[in-house]
Image (cartoon, helix red, strand yellow):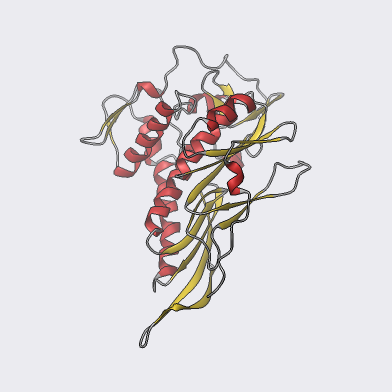
Amino acid sequence: MTVLRVHLRDKKFQSEKIMTYWHWNGYGFRAMNTRVYTWLYSSAPNSTDILLDVQSTFNSMERRLSRFIPHSELSQLNNHTGDEFIASPILFSAVQSALWAATATGGLFDPTILPELEAAGYDRSFEKVERHQSPLNGNGASAARLNFTHVTLKPYNRGIVKPDGLKLDLGGMGKGWTVDRVADRLLTLGAFLVNAGGDLYAYGAPPNRTAWTVELPHPPGAPRPVTKLYVANRAVATSSILNRRWMRGNTLQHHLIDPRTGKPADTDLLTVTVIASRVAVAEVYAKVALILGAKAGLAYLEALPNVEGLLYTREHTILHTSQFRQYLRQPEVYAPQ
């Protein structure tokens, strides 16, 4: 464990008898198969312990929400047969959020595509995915396949009712949902940034700044330089077909399943970055836009309130929503008094 701290003194917090020291704490660790970093600028005396709590939160959420842990609560739900499954508050809230997202996107985001994802070869934690020599089986989704509409929630007792065989994968949304939970915990402490593999929430701004500077690299091999985003009190999430892909027989697969076909999405986009109010929301809308492709995806994001997006195509061209440029310009820097 390495905790970095830089002490800064700000005169506006000075009184005759009390001097309050604001300082940076930074902490990084690995969870949910990615690197997680948190930076916090705070005067809280226990800010180091708070950052350790961030790691505990991620580890706890992973133990409950990962489909790759055989005894996780999500795995127990997926293997449950018969009557309703009584979930913990954490799992129930996460599933409730995922079903809301499925409804809001008309099923283009669907947390019940796990059987199709496994059929494509993503049946274990990604670093353990091996080349499958056998060809793909089946023809993808059918009109009768089980989907999110077959899941019933009972809030009064946190009951989840689903048909036998229906399985959920919270995936990237679960990671974004966890970042949102951590952000809620840090909101009253000072400026912070929580970054989980590119899915991040930026609150406030560093001293003498009006926004956080976030580097957004283009896909590998792209002839363009890194883009810098300037964000404050906003969430950022990127969806890509480049990072999790593998061979199944002689066919290249990726993890982004199109619920309409039951197969990896056939899209002319490589990555989509979305800026929204919450990380889980940005994650969902980025996936939907990527599935829809450049033209329809851009139109989809343009129609969403309080959401902006940047789309990178297979031809290495950049598209973005009409108001996205506000996050590409460096805002005015506060002059020290």
Q: Which of 304 and 199 is in front in this view?
A: 304
Q: Is residue 331 above or below residue 320?
A: below
User: Does the image show residue 265?
Assistant: no
Image spot of residue 52 (x, y percent): 44, 63
Seen in the picture, residue 60 relative to 274 is either above or below; the reply is below
Left or right for 98, reference 230:
left
Q: Does 181 sit left or right of 31 as displayed?
A: left
The correct choice, above or below, for 45 with respect to 281 in the image is below
Q: Quadrant of residue 167?
A: top left
Residue visible at 34% across and 30% down in the picture = 80
Q: Where is residue 246 in the image (x, y as percent from the top left)?
A: 66, 33
Write the residue at 58% across / 47% down.
326
Residue placed furthest toward the right = 223
Name the side, left or right, on which 145 lies relative to 294: left
Residue at the location (33% across, 40% down)? 93
Q: Where is residue 105 in the image (x, y as percent from the top left)?
A: 45, 27
Residue 121 picture quarter? top right
Q: Can you name the residue that lies furthest to the left here?
A: 156
Q: Position of residue 173 (x, y in %)?
A: 47, 39
Q: How many labels does the image show?
A: 0
Task: Say which of 252 and 189 sits in front.
Answer: 189
The residue most toward the top is: 143
Whether residue 208 is visible, yes or no, is yes
Give the side of residue 80 with respect to residue 222, left or right. left
Q: For this rendering, which residue is in front, 269 or 158?
A: 269
